Image: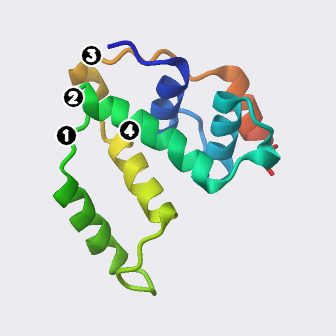
């Protein structure tokens, strides 16, 4: 399986190759670039859709072992540490998906991710993401 450019960049990002991780700001830029949208047109649902697409691809190709029951149980368990216990929103789901993407064993799975895009890194570090 060959991963697409933005899939590789997102995996590299979750693994800390972009010097900064600020999901709220940075993923907006990833989504805008992938879907050719203006930053002002990107909402949380667009970001979640992008990450879900990548997550699904990784599951289908054996990089993430998905179990629905375990996924939901872990979301509920982690939500118990929030002030609004057992309330799960799209942000909780997004962070769970990103954590699982981050935990992919790249070397042992033989994934070739390439290098972080220096232009994208520059944009992230310039903090132009609204």
Q: Is residue 98 above or below residue 110?
A: below
Q: Which mark, by number, is residue 55?
A: 4
Q: Neighbour class for label 3 at 10 Å: few (<14), some, many (≥20)? A: few
Q: Kindly state the secondary structure of the residue where label 3 is placed.
A: loop
Tell me the residue that label 1 is attached to: 65
x then y, percent, for residue 62: 21, 28
x then y, percent, for residue 59: 27, 34
Residue located at (71% from left, 38% from top): 124
Is residue 20 something that shows in the picture? yes
x then y, percent, for residue 7: 48, 27
Relative to the observer, which residue lies in front, 82 or 116?
Answer: 82
Q: Tags 4 and 3 in contact by the CB under 8 Å rule?
A: no
Q: Kindly state the secondary structure of the residue where label 1 is placed.
A: loop
What separation in Å lies between label 3 and label 1 (alpha carbons)?
16 Å
Q: Tags 1 and 2 in contact by the CB under 8 Å rule?
A: yes
On-image quarter of the N terminus: top left
Q: Of callouts 4 and 3, which one flags the residue occurring earlier in the amino acid sequence?
A: 4
Q: Of callouts 3 and 2, which one flags the residue occurring earlier in the amino acid sequence?
A: 2
Direction from residue 68 to residue 57 in the image, left or right: right
Q: Which mark, by number, is residue 110?
A: 3
State the image quarter where residue 55 is shown: top left
Relative to the observer, which residue lies in front, 79 or 121?
Answer: 79
Q: Of callouts 4 and 2, which one flags the residue occurring earlier in the amino acid sequence?
A: 4
What separation in Å lies between label 4 and label 3 (alpha carbons)?
17 Å
Q: Nearer the viewer, mark 4 or mark 3?
A: 4
What separation in Å lies between label 4 and label 2 (alpha carbons)?
11 Å
Q: Of callouts 4 and 1, which one flags the residue occurring earlier in the amino acid sequence?
A: 4
Direction from residue 75 to residue 47 in the image, left or right: right
């Amino acid at each position: 399986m060959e991963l697409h450019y933005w899939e590789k960049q997102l995996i590299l990002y979750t693994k800390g190759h972009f010097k900064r991780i600020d999901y709220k700001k940075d993923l907006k830029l990833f989504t805008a670039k992938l879907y050719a949208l203006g930053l002002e047109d990107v909402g949380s649902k667009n970001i979640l859709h992008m990450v879900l697409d990548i997550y699904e691809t990784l599951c289908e190709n054996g990089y993430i072992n998905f179990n629905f029951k375990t996924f939901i149980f872990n979301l509920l368990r982690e939500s118990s540490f929030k002030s609004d216990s057992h309330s799960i929103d799209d942000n909780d789901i997004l962070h769970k998906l990103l954590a699982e993407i981050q935990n992919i064993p790249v070397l042992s799975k033989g994934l070739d991710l390439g290098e972080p895009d220096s232009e994208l890194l520059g944009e992230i570090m310039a903090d132009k993401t609204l």
